Amino acid sequence: MWVAELRFRIIADTSYTEAEAAIRCYLESLIFQGQILGREFPTYLAQDEFVSRVILPATDALHNQHHSKRGLQALQALGTAGIAYPKLELLGEDLMSNHTDPCAVSESYILYCRFGHSNSVLYCGEHFAPVPLYQADATSALDHEDLIRWQLQYQALDEIQMQEKRVLDKTAEHSLQKLHSSLNQQGRRFARRLEQSLQKPVYYALYSGSSVNCALEANKCCPGCGKGWALAEPLHELFDFQCENCRLVCNIAWQCQ
Ligand SMILES: [Zn+2]
Ligand SMILES: [Zn+2]
């Protein structure tokens, strides 16, 4: 991932409110297309320009061909608000985040979401590295907003269930763990839609959570079809189970490993 600055030069009479709204709208369109990552974008006014600091999944993430319809509209609206098209300045590679997948196309993908990862939830099946969402057709008519909003909810629940003193007892963990929770149902729907758009298998990584009986954990069956799904060798040193039919991957509960 790359740290970059977007420089929005002021080219006409504008107010702070008008300029700020137009920049916010543009940045939002980039978030929901997977072109910038994270949620915090410090923006300041420097003489005749506004400067926003962003994280990009790839150096070409902001090329026009990756913009959603909403992004192109937001870009046009900057002019109306007295702001020029942004100038991109790459500052360097982000040392705190993981590397974007190198493949142009992959043979399979995994939809994988965990707390604390701001990158795309779509991973290459071969390298298990995140694939920028703009490389896949949007799952809704506009962009990937619904998928990114789902990711935020998933991460919020994951963050809760990670805490020792939870504010929700088992509710958060069950949402992540149960195949038929609305969280996982929605997630699998996104995986199916991405599969249609990419024309490649997209597996859904089901969170295993805590186990009630470690003796049975390694022999558990696929919760989708009830068949055996244990892999001879773990996939990406993470997944011990894979069901091709149900498009699911999962692991042995951490406590039992
Ligand atoms: Zn790859
Ligand atoms: Zn299955």
Image (cartoon, rainbow, N blue to C red):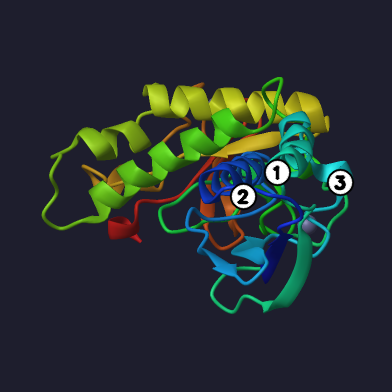
Left/right placement of residue 69 relative to residue 53 reads right
Where does label 2 land, which residue?
A: 120
> Is label 2 in contact with label 1 (beta carbons under 8 Å)?
yes
Where does label 1 land, which residue?
A: 133
Residue sitting at x 65%, y 39% = 29
Where does label 3 land, which residue?
A: 64
Cα–Cα span, label 2 and label 3: 19 Å
The amino acid at mark 1 is Leu
Left/right placement of residue 160 relative to residue 28 reads left
Q: Label 2's element?
A: loop
The amino acid at mark 2 is Ser
Residue 156: where, in percent of width, then height?
34, 44
The amino acid at mark 3 is Asn
Front disc: 3 or 1 = 3
Up the image or down, 34 lies above or below 102; here it is above
Up the image or down, 12 lies above or below 168; here it is below
Up the image or down, 148 lies above or below 97; here it is above
Residue 197: where, in percent of width, then height?
79, 27
